[in-house]
Image (cartoon, rainbow, N blue to C red):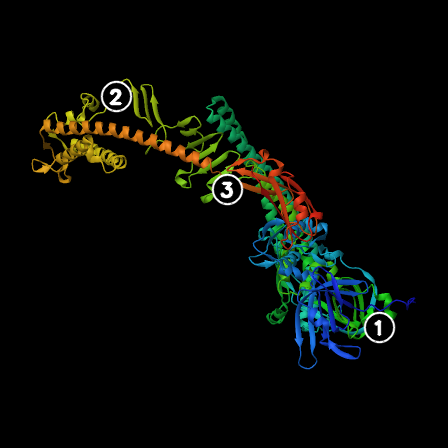
Amino acid sequence: MFIDINYNRRPQEAKFHLAKPNKQIISHVSEKFQHKLALKLGNIHEMSFSIPFYIEEEMEQVRNPHVDIIKEKMLIRVTMGDYKDWFVVDSIEEDGDDSDIFNVTTFSLPYELKGKRISGLSEESINATALLTLLLENTIWSIGTIDPIFDQMYRSFESGDDSNILDCITNATETYGALIEWDSINRKVSFKDPTKNGSFKGMTVTYGRLLNSVKRTRSTDEMVTRMYVYGSEDLTIHSVNPTGQGYIENFDYFMYPFQRDANKNVIQSSYYMSDALCHAILDHQALISLNASNIAIITGELAVRQADLITEQSKLDDLQLELENILDLLDVAKGAEDSAGITARTKDKTDKEAEIATQKAVVTQASIKVQQSTNALNAIQGQISGQASFTPALLDELNPFIIESTWRDDNYINAQELYDDGLKKFEELRKPKIVIEASIENILGAIEEQYYWDKLVLGDLIKVKYPQMNIEYMAKIIEINYDLEAQEATLTIANTTDLLNDAERLLQLLRNSSTATSMVQNNKYKWDKINPIQQSVNSILTSEWDATKNKILAGINNTVEVGNRGIIIRNPDPDFQHEIVIMQSGVIALSKDDGETWKTAIRPDGIIAERLIGQIIAGQELIITNDSGSFTLDNNGARFSVSSFIIESSNGTNMVDKWTSTSNFVDDFTDDNVITPYEKKMLKNQFDEFETRYNANVAKINLYYAGEQGNYAYITDYYAKYLALYNYLFVELQGDKPLLAGNNMVASTRVDSSVFRQRYKDYDNALVEVEKQILIRTKNYTDDAIGEVQDNIDEVKDDVVYKTELHSTNGNVFNNGVINTTIYAVVYRGKENITANLPNSAFKWKKTDMNGVADTAWNTAHANVGSTIQVTGTDVFKKATFWCDIDIP
């Protein structure tokens, strides 16, 4: 190939420019040396350089000014041909031992996101664009390009309690399987599909041509020779695997380069295995091949019979669903007490049960055929296993070569599909992975190599040839390390054959983490299929659950069933298995004969029951009604509306007649001058009420007659009469004990009825008088309090607090000079909005600049303009603060 070399083009030397954090260039760092640049695909780039403390100017050694102006967090712009990038200074090391060197270490501009803290971000289901929007919300970075595949994926994501934006974005690339692309020029971040990243632009390096050295690394971190395969609900491949095992295995890598002829004569031995072991493995493979056709026939027959079984089982399920619907209608008819409906639905039920019995027999026959095919397949697999020529010694030799792993995909419900895809996954993992490092000349500094200047691009493909090591690879450049002073570059590349078939390998290699790879690989299928699953879950969560199609079982031995008949709860005791509770059609029904009849039911208009057992707890109102009348218990007490009311004592006496014969229980109790134990109990209850009422009256007297109780005869008399009654009942002896003493409650006591009645009458008269006077005093105090409250209200009205609020229609903080908002003031007098009542002159708008200095011209222009102003970018230079003073007329 002839290349037209343009000698007028300048070599693409690296130029470093120092800048402030706002990217304002302030100096050109031309005296740099020992400068190195490491570009990493999908990662943070690194760059380091050194400068001397002293430089020569006009034949003199003077202090290098860059030593004083290069500081941490400042920016370095690196330009090298078409390559341009920004780096942030991370650390500075001053070495003054011998050479007085100033060493600077930098990272590419996205490193600044490491200083942005985030905590507690937790999303259960989110796509890439939405997640990046949340992460970049409070930064000056924005989203570049998100490949559509990542917006169709929904992932869960957690930032942790104390993380930073850079780490979260890096973790997001692992979550979505994306290749991150940083645009430091425009501060944008993009997520790219690794399978579509990079292209071959014709660059080839070979021994003697650009290639200085080469190193090849083989990794067995993920290598596997036996892979166990599982699907949904631990579905295995035993039934479809010719070996009858639940795993796939292949030892070809360790058998290489073993060869034998048709007579089993060894042509070439394996590097790892003995000839005997290689023979046994090949013999076993031959047995599998020999029986493969029979296995395929039986497997096909099994698939057909399984399909037939599914079809017949589906018919049975439909019939059972129809029966459920009939039972549902039967329940409704029973709930409505529809005799004709009950008869019709009962006949339908009998007919459908007969159909179900017939279909169950068909399903049983289909199940038998499936089992026959399964047994035939097991027999062939057992024959293969029994004829295998692995002796115990060979099995011991084989053991070190068995490298086990597991691949699980819960989305597979068909064993054959699981086995077929398992073979593909196994093929990806069974060989060691290869990574190559190649050191090449720095073609950017050579005019003669200008043809390749635009072809050495991170992420692109390069062809590497090195005959001495039998290396010839088309590979992806995943890292370029430039030694800019030595004019050479080291490339890290990986085998494209693996990378293009499995993009996850590339992402794992970029993250340089081999420990997590198997986990990511084995669960990648979950992420790839999460979108339809997420949609199904959302459908379930956001719509009603159709119980006629999705029966729910719970409880001990599935005694609780939620289905098209409603909720059915069965008694788990086998002796009472026909006792059920059915909830549906607005009725809760209880049955002892499996729903044939309902003896007890709760309906919206009441409870139907043959009998009620236990306690009845009433709420606001309890009504008991029959043909003879009604009993009502409510807040007003108990009322009987009946033609005859009888409460019998043990001797048959109607106690109601006795109670209604006197209007005063005191007169009734003393009519015979004897107080019985029952009467003592009633008197004690009555006095307890007196005591509660007395204590309440004393509290009121202390409040309304503070310090002057003795000035009022009715108060003194009330105290005396209560004490006299108390002493009569609890202190004075009636016989040998006080009347209501604790040890005298179970015996009858003789009393003087005239004294007994007089004590009660005296207390009752004093009670009436004192409560009348307390009521009068209470009213007087209430009137005085109302007047005082009104005075306080009037005083508060005369001293109402004014308050001002400022609102912005487009937020309160603006970045990058993009400002356009309306600010308006709202004035309150107490809780009343009085803004509309104020003149424009009442509003004095004020502004200060970034240094807190008042902007007189602006303030003058915005005085007396009313409650609303418009603010744009012309009103702000870097920073400004706005407020409004209110002048109330």
Farthest left residue in view: 735
Q: Considering the image in quadrants, where does the C terminus appear? A: top right
Between 476 and 573, the one nearer to me in the picture? 476
Q: Which residue is drawn at 84% across and 72% down?
A: 209
Disc 2 marks which residue? 645
Tally the numbered discs.
Answer: 3
Residue 773 rendering spot, x and y as whole percentages: 25, 28
Assess disc 3: are there few (<14), some (14-19) or many (≥20) residues with their C-alpha within 10 Å of its C-alpha: some
Between 751 and 471, the one nearer to me in the picture? 751
Disc 1 marks which residue? 209
Q: Which amino acid does label 2 sit on?
A: Phe
Q: How far apart are marks 2 and 3 (CA)?
A: 52 Å
Farthest top residue in view: 643
SS of the residue at dot 3? strand
- Residue 554 in the figure: left or right of residue 749: right
SS of the residue at dot 2? loop
Residue 425 rendering spot, x and y as whole percentages: 68, 58
Between disc 2 and disc 3, the foreground one is 2
Disc 3 marks which residue? 553
Q: Which of marks 2 and 3 is nearer the N terminus?
A: 3
Please say if the residues under marks 3 and 1 sit with CB atoms less than 8 Å apart: no
Q: How far apart are marks 3 and 1 (CA)?
A: 74 Å
Task: Give the label on residue 622, or none.
Answer: none
